[in-house]
């Protein structure tokens, strides 16, 4: 790992006496702000700000959408069942353990509404900004525990913060925006203990990209009937972000509870379902995407190292690196070079998150970064 901050500096930055729970990360531009800005909808921007799949959608999924248009006068019930059945088989669960949503965001919001509002939410700092955004919008009280000196979610410190009011624990693994992953064995023991009283929600949006053999999904705990919710998405490795399909895995009692917050009996469109069904079985496409992501990420990391930027080792399709000027200004300067990235501040430090685009996109990004540095 290429990181020059030592533990003392990091702890100084984050954990000053008694105040550390108040050190909250900030995403300096939010997704909604960005999508509302007309200028950045132009096509000549290189979009390295949303961790999307830059390789498009699988050809089979593309064809499925076109075919589905002809039947789109029908409600999509049957295809809900078909996708649920496929996911259930792959995960070794029965269909009652699965819920589909218009993106995993829909399921995240159900969890916030049903479990988050019941007591207090416990999560790491930083973590997926939209989760914090939605929880705040829902009026939840949120306790955030800084990541450790390796920028990993500090499970030990989090365990100490669980109390009788903790109703929902959100763990994003690998975490967004850091890309860092927690070891499967440690996460498993944390979840076993924490799920006795609270719902532990493990967001596995980047699950398919992980290479580290110490990683494991927490789906085995769902099979054991523990109070765990896992979400996954078709927006990343499957390349269907614009079609909005995600799923949740949990015990049927939890799924039933979540569905009390469902606002729509069928939020996923018929073409989206058909595309997801095809994409789910296109193993060659996902294998290629994973491979290319790995190669381009290695290239990006090497170039960041050469330019002297400290970065956090990532198990996902983005990299977070530290900058020594205002990250917002750097993101603005990159935007002038037609490259979109995400600025963050946490632990009193400035960071830029860059998604792994195609090799050509990352080359353009590196040229722009070198120019503005
Ligand atoms: C950690 C994490 N969870 C969930 C999502 C949302 O995914 P979806 O498109 O499935 O709503 C994202 C998207 O960037 C993410 O990074």
Image (tube, rainbow, N blue to C red):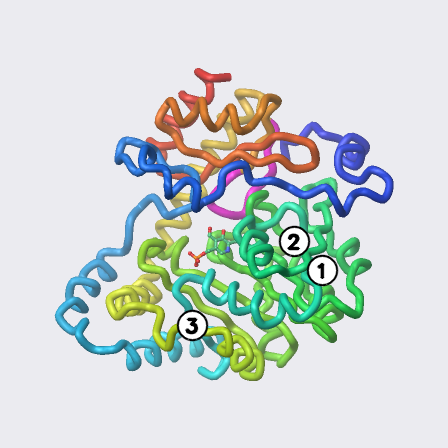
SS category of the residue bearing label 1: helix
Instruction: Tell which tag, 2 or 3, sits nearer the viewer.
Output: 3
Q: Residue at x 53, y 20 (%)?
A: 307
Q: Is residue 205 magenta?
A: no
Identify the mark nearer the N-term, 3 or 1: 1
For the record, the magenta segment spans 310-319
Q: Residue at x 52, y 78 (%)?
A: 255
Q: Residue at x 39, y 56 (%)?
A: 235
SS category of the residue bearing label 2: loop
Judge the density around disc 1: few (<14), some (14-19), many (≥20) Cα neighbours within 10 Å: few
Residue under pointer 1:
186
Label 1 close to label 2 by CB (< 8 Å): yes
**Residue 356, quarter of picture:** top left
Residue under pointer 3:
263
Identify the mark nearer the N-term, 2 or 3: 2
In the image, 321: left or right of 59?
A: right
**Residue 247, quarter of picture:** bottom left
Q: Quadrant of the N terminus?
A: top right
Residue under pointer 2:
182
């Amino acid at each position: 790992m290429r990181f020059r901050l030592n533990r003392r500096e990091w702890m100084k930055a984050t954990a000053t006496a008694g105040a550390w729970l108040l050190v909250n990360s900030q995403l300096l531009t939010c997704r909604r702000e960005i999508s509302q800005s007309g200028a950045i909808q132009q096509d000549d921007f290189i979009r390295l700000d949303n961790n999307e799949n830059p390789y498009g959608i699988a050809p089979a999924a593309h064809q499925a959408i076109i075919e589905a248009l002809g039947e789109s006068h029908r409600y999509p019930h049957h295809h809900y069942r078909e996708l649920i059945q496929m996911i259930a088989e792959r995960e070794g669960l029965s269909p009652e353990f699965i819920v589909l949503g218009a993106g995993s965001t829909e399921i995240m919001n159900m969890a916030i509404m049903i479990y988050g509002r019941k007591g207090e939410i416990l999560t790491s700092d930083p973590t997926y900004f939209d989760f914090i955004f939605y929880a705040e919008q829902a009026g939840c009280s949120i306790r955030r525990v800084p990541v450790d000196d390796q920028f990993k979610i500090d499970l030990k410190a989090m365990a100490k913060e669980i109390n009788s009011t903790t109703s929902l624990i959100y763990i994003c693994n690998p975490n967004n925006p850091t890309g860092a992953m927690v070891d499967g064995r440690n996460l498993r023991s944390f979840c076993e203990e924490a799920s006795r009283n609270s719902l532990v929600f493990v967001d596995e949006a980047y699950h398919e990209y992980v290479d580290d053999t110490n990683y494991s999904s927490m789906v085995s705990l769902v099979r054991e009937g523990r109070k765990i919710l896992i979400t996954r998405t078709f927006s990343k490795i499957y390349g269907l972000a614009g079609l909005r399909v995600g799923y949740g895995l949990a015990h049927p009692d939890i799924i039933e509870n979540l569905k009390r917050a469902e606002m729509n009996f069928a939020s996923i469109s018929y073409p989206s379902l058909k595309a997801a069904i095809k994409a789910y079985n296109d193993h060659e496409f996902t294998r290629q995407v994973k491979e290319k992501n790995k190669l381009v990420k290695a290239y990006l990391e090497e170039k960041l190292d050469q330019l002297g930027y400290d970065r956090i080792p990532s198990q996902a399709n983005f990299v977070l690196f530290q900058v020594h000027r205002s990250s917002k200004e750097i993101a603005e300067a990159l935007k002038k070079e037609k490259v979109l990235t995400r600025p963050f501040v946490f632990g009193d430090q400035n960071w830029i998150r860059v998604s792994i685009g195609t090799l050509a996109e990352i080359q353009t990004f590196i040229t722009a970064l070198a120019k503005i540095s």
